Image (cartoon, rainbow, N blue to C red):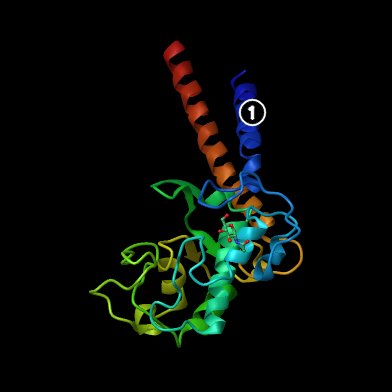
Amino acid sequence: MWVQLSLLLVLFSGTLSLDKLNMCMDAKHHKVEPGPEGKLYGQCTPWRDNACCTANTSEEAHADNSYLYNFNWDHCGFMSKKCREHFVQDTCFYECSPHLGPWIQKVDQSWRKERIVDVPLCVEDCHTWWEDCKEDFTCKTDWHKGWDWSSGINKCPDQSKCRKWTEIYPTPKSMCEQIWSNSYLYTSLSKTSGRCVQLWFTGPNPNRKVAEYYLNNAQQHQSFAFTMLLFLAFASLSVVMS
Ligand SMILES: *[C@@H]1O[C@H](CO)[C@@H](O)[C@H](O)[C@H]1NC(C)=O
């Protein structure tokens, strides 16, 4: 009887997490549900078949100081075009991705209720991002917080000077993990592994399978722990009863 019950519960918890494969986080500009968006713009077009961003958001993702976050990429002089492209891609990824379920966590922030944490980034995407930005300048390691917003757009706070990118971020890993306060996790996995998330892709979104992989693994651990717990409860019960 215990076995049937635990099997049922395991199956139930499995179906509960199914929507984690296709969902939108509760943040500033995300849609409630993912769906087709035929008019996505520029670098956001790979998400057209199924997206958490609207056409408007996808267009704004390409603009300077856009209404999305009023974020100023040029806080230490002009950001180079090739570096900027990675931030546009990162914005498209953040706003449009419907397959980030396994890495979404609740946060207590005024401007969003959920964020992503430790999304395992493919090594190619992290390295090209850093390579294309390493001649640029910045003043901060964590771009999520600590800016001077008094003018409405982010400026470097008084105590932080503009420095070479490589002084702020000595390695691709330090950049990818620190820039958005651990939204990304550095991995040495390549795009062909199917176990890391891709910012840049063409064709069908490869990240669904990756989310599925991590979800199944986490679920197996959970179900295993849960089954063990039931087993122990049952075992101690039978000891008490005998
Ligand atoms: C997107 O929507 C905002 C708010 O409604 C508006 O201010 C902005 O002009 C729109 N952007 C585009 C590109 O349509």
Residue behind mark 1: 7
Q: What residue is rendered at 34% in x and 72% in y?
A: 155
Give the position of the N terminus as an image quadrant.
top right
Q: Is residue 104 left or right of residue 169?
A: right
Residue at 64% x, 57% y is 210
Q: Does residue 127 sit above or below 97 in this rendering?
A: below
Task: Determine if residue 242 is in view.
Answer: no
Q: Is residue 17 left or right of residue 178?
A: right
Q: Nearer the viewer, residue 75 or 131?
A: 75
- Who's the residue at 59% across and 52% down the image? 214
Instruction: Give the vertical position of 40 relative to 225 (above or below).
Output: below
Q: Position of residue 87 (x, y in %)?
A: 53, 72
Q: Is residue 155 above or below residue 31?
A: below
> Does residue 175 appear anywhere in the picture?
yes
Q: State the image quarter where residue 145 is shown.
A: bottom left
| Figure quadrant, ligand 1 | bottom right
- Ligand 1 lies under 8 Å from the Cβ of mark 1: no
Position in image of residue 128 (x %, y %): 56, 80
Foreground residue, 39 or 186?
Answer: 39
